[in-house]
């Protein structure tokens, strides 16, 4: 295994390319259970028939770090294409929405439940007991579905291969549940990246294509924002608190 070609570097992981394989190496602090969960999610989603890179190996390097080995997909991410080819931005956004609808059309019954994950995240936040109670009441009231949800669906997690085929990567946060929560998460990710206009356009497009009421998606926002706040990014804290606080006043 050669670890010399870095494709992406994050605080908790480095992604390398080695020939026709990608090696995602996690930092020493990363819990083994999180790494194995990511690999298991990806293997399960693979079985749904969705186009995603196949897992080849889960291994431990000599220095003790865990790594996931998967197929390398040659191409560009939708994020790169959107940046490079602005004239076709709307076309890429439409493709992005169609791909997410494709994800939601799948069932992966062995995945963790979105609702359980949200409940756990709400309990881990530092919002007051009153706010946490309201968030849980809202979560309980949302319709229970079992659709495949990516959990971090954003344009950097879609690779368009040379032949035009799209592959969805990064299944660490995948669950089964209500697709509107997944849409609210994507909306929030655009907002957190400062792309408010894109967020609105995305939401409108998704709601039109799926015949979903915008209000229904937006009802998930305080819950999704609370779960995002657990990641503890200080620059996001104030922004997320504003989204969460609406539950207290409604
Ligand atoms: N199988 C793959 N084939 C080609 N490129 C890949 C592959 N996996 C990852 N990459 C590249 O590495 C980047 C980061 O990988 P990935 O999305 O899995 O991790 P991440 O974004 O750091 O995870 P998170 O979204 O949890 O922060 C991708 O945006 C993509 O450019
Ligand atoms: Mg990613």
Image (cartoon, rainbow, N blue to C red):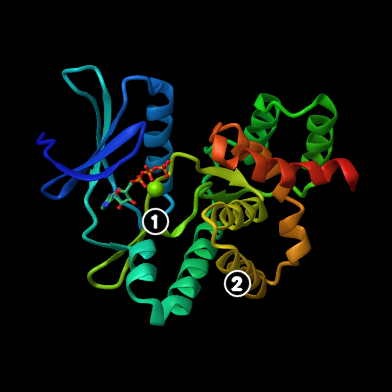
Q: Which residue appears at 65% of the width and 28% of the height?
A: 120
Left or right relative to 219: residue 248: right
Q: Which residue appears at 63% of the width and 68% of the height?
A: 200
Residue 203 quadrant: bottom right
The answer to whether 20 is drawn above or below residue 26 in the figure is below
Q: Mark 2 vs mark 1: which is more N-terminal?
A: 1
Q: Which residue appears at 33% of the width and 64% of the height?
A: 80
| The residue at label 1 has a CB less than 8 Å from ligand 1 | yes
The answer to whether 94 is drawn above or below residue 238 in the figure is below
The answer to whether 114 is drawn above or below residue 184 in the figure is above
Query: Would you call the spot at circle 2 few (<14 residues within 10 Å), some (14-19), or many (20 or more)?
Result: some
Left or right relative to 54: residue 151: right
Spatial CA span between label 2 and label 1: 18 Å
Query: Would you call the spot at circle 1 few (<14 residues within 10 Å), some (14-19), or many (20 or more)?
Result: some
Q: Position of residue 187 (x, y in %)?
A: 60, 58
Residue under label 1: 156
Dot 1: element: helix
Left or right relative to 71: residue 154: right
Q: Position of residue 3 (x, y in %)?
A: 13, 36
* Residue at the extreme right of the image, as rendered: 250
Residue under label 2: 201
Residue 115 quadrant: top right
């Amino acid at each position: 295994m050669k670890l010399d070609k870095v494709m992406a570097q994050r605080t908790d992981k480095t992604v390398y390319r080695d020939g026709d394989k990608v090696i995602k190496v996690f930092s020493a602090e990363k819990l083994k259970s999180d790494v194995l969960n990511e690999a298991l999610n990806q293997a399960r989603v693979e079985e749904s028939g969705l186009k995603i890179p196949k897992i080849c190996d889960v291994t431990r390097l000599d220095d003790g770090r865990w790594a996931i080995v998967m197929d390398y997909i040659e191409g560009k991410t939708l994020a790169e294409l959107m940046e490079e080819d602005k004239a076709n931005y709307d076309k890429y956004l439409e493709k992005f929405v169609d791909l997410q609808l494709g994800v939601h059309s799948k069932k992966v019954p062995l995945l963790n439940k979105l609702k359980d994950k949200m409940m756990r995240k709400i309990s881990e936040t530092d919002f007051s007991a009153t706010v946490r109670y309201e968030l849980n009441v809202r979560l309980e009231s949302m319709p229970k579905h079992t659709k495949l949800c990516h959990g971090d669906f954003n344009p950097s997690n879609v690779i368009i291969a040379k032949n035009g085929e799209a592959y969805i990567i990064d299944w660490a946060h995948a669950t089964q549940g209500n697709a509107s929560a997944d849409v609210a998460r994507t909306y929030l990710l655009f907002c957190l990246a400062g792309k408010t206009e894109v967020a609105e356009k995305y939401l409108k497009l998704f709601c039109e294509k799926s015949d979903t009421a915008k209000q229904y998606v937006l009802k998930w926002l305080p819950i999704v924002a609370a779960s995002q706040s657990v990641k503890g990014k200080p620059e996001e804290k104030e922004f997320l608190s504003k989204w969460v606080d609406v539950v207290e006043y409604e």
